[in-house]
Amino acid sequence: WQVRWNAAKALAFAGSEQQVGSLASCLSDEVWLVRLEVCASLGILGDLKARDGLERALRSDCNSRVREEAARSLAAIGKSARQLGESTDLSSCADALVAALQDEEIKVRSAAIAALGSQAVAAREHASSLVEQ
């Protein structure tokens, strides 16, 4: 498991966005530490292709730390996409984040609140730019 954990970390810091699919497939690894690192790495990479896998992890991973990191990574992906000027519709992950507000673990709920808050700020900024036009 340590090899898989180190590989996930290395892919994130190498900036290997072409490996997002391979990395996302490791979200089903049997070791929660590997899944945790995969979530973090996907957030660092910031690629929208990771969204579905992170949503699944947020909704259904058995480990609360993995769910927490999935929420953080979804927020990071949205931020990264906005910085690159990509049109982002993260409304599909809003459902997963809203559902996470009912999570039994407070850290998961807090991460979901922060992620929703970052999306709300972005939505407000976008709306105000449309009003100015």
Image: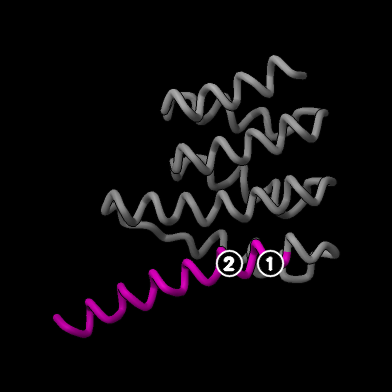
- Residues under numbered marks 1 and 2 in contact, where contact means CB atoms less than 8 Å apart: yes
Residue at label 2?
114
Q: Residue at x 26, y 53 (%)?
A: 85
Kind of residue indicated by mark 1: Ser
Real-space Cα distance between discs 1 and 2? 6 Å
Bin the neighbour count of mark 2 within 10 Å (Cα to Cα): few under 14, some 14-19, many 20 and up: some
Kind of residue indicated by mark 2: Ala
Q: Is residue 119 magenta?
A: yes
Tell me which corner region of the image, top left, top right, bottom left or bottom right, holds residue 112.
bottom right
Q: What kind of element bears circle 2?
A: helix
Q: What kind of element bears circle 1?
A: helix
Rendered location of residue 62, percent (x, y): 84, 46
Q: Which residues are magenta?
A: 109-133
Please, what is the dominant secondary structure of the magenta stretch? helix
User: Which quarter of the rendering shows the N terminus?
Assistant: top right
Q: Residue at x 42, y 29 (%)?
A: 17
Q: Residue at x 76, y 28 (%)?
A: 29
Rendered location of residue 22, percent (x, y): 57, 24
Q: In the displayed structure, does residue 47 sit left or right of residue 65?
A: left
Rendered location of residue 127, percent (x, y): 31, 79
- Decide which of 34, 99 is in the foreground and name it: 34
Residue at label 1?
110
Q: Is residue 1 magenta?
A: no
User: Which quarter of the rendering shows the C terminus?
Assistant: bottom left
